[in-house]
Image (cartoon, rainbow, N blue to C red):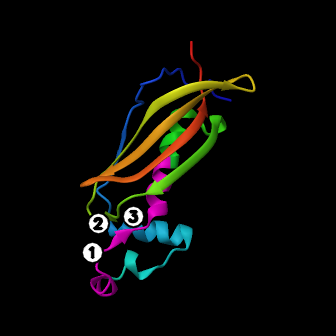
């Protein structure tokens, strides 16, 4: 098991930049997750939807964010993870994944950090969320 990350309130672990998002990225995720909604791959269908172009599925961004959390803190230290989808991601968007240590508490003998999470796309936040992770405080 990895040693818990040493953090303090206000810390912002290294960000991750992903993209630009390509049609191949979306098709790969659709194949892995089974989401074949035409909004994600069919430009003619998308033209009738009100969106200006093909959009990536929200779970793709949530998965990217979950990967950042588990890589940053260790999957064995993740106690909770949740997201809220706030805006669509389009082809060619570049995503920046980040988090801020919002609070540290103790429960059951573990130091737990509440991490405010955000994935920012080309035009602003696309996913927000939070995670609770075991950390070291000294």
Counting from the top left corner in percent of width and height, residue 20 is at 28, 56
Q: Which mark is residue 53?
A: 1
Q: Which mark is residue 25?
A: 3
Whole-number angstrom distance, CA of label 1 to CA of label 2: 8 Å
The tally of labels here is 3
- Residue position marked by numbered label 2 in the rendering: 91
Counting from the top left corner in percent of width and height, residue 132 is at 59, 37
The quarter of the image holding the C terminus is top right
- Left or right: 38, with 137 as reference point: left
Residue closer to the observer: 13 or 128:
128
Q: Quadrant of residue 80?
A: top right
On the question of residue 4 being in view, the answer is no
Residue mark closest to the camera, 1 vs 2: 1
Q: Residues within 10 Å of mark 3 (few under 14, many from 20)?
A: some
For the record, the magenta segment spans: 43-65
Q: Secondary structure at mark 2?
A: loop
- Left or right: 135, with 63 as reference point: right
Whole-number angstrom distance, CA of label 3 to CA of label 2: 9 Å
Residue closer to the observer: 136 or 1:
136
Q: Which mark is residue 106?
A: none
* Residue at the (55%, 74%) spot, across then down: 34
Proximity of marks 1 and 3: CB atoms separated by less than 8 Å: no
Proximity of marks 1 and 2: CB atoms separated by less than 8 Å: yes
Residue closer to the observer: 34 or 132:
132
Residue mark closest to the camera, 3 vs 2: 2
Whole-number angstrom distance, CA of label 1 to CA of label 3: 15 Å
Residue 45 sits inside the magenta stretch: yes
Q: Residue furthest top?
A: 138
Q: Is residue 119 above or below residue 28?
A: above
């Amino acid at each position: 098991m990895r040693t818990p990350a040493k953090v303090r309130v206000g810390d912002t672990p290294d960000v991750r930049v992903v993209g630009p998002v390509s049609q191949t990225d979306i098709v790969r995720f659709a194949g892995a997750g089974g989401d074949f909604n035409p909004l994600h791959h069919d430009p003619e269908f998308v033209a009738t939807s009100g969106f200006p172009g093909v959009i990536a599925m929200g779970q793709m961004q949530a998965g990217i964010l979950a990967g950042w959390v588990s890589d940053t803190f260790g999957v064995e230290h993740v106690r909770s993870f949740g997201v809220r989808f706030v805006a669509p991601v389009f082809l060619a968007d570049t995503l920046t994944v980040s988090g801020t240590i919002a609070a540290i508490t103790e429960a059951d003998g573990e130091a737990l950090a509440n991490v405010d999470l955000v994935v920012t796309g080309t035009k602003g936040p696309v996913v927000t969320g939070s995670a609770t992770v075991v950390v070291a405080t000294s």
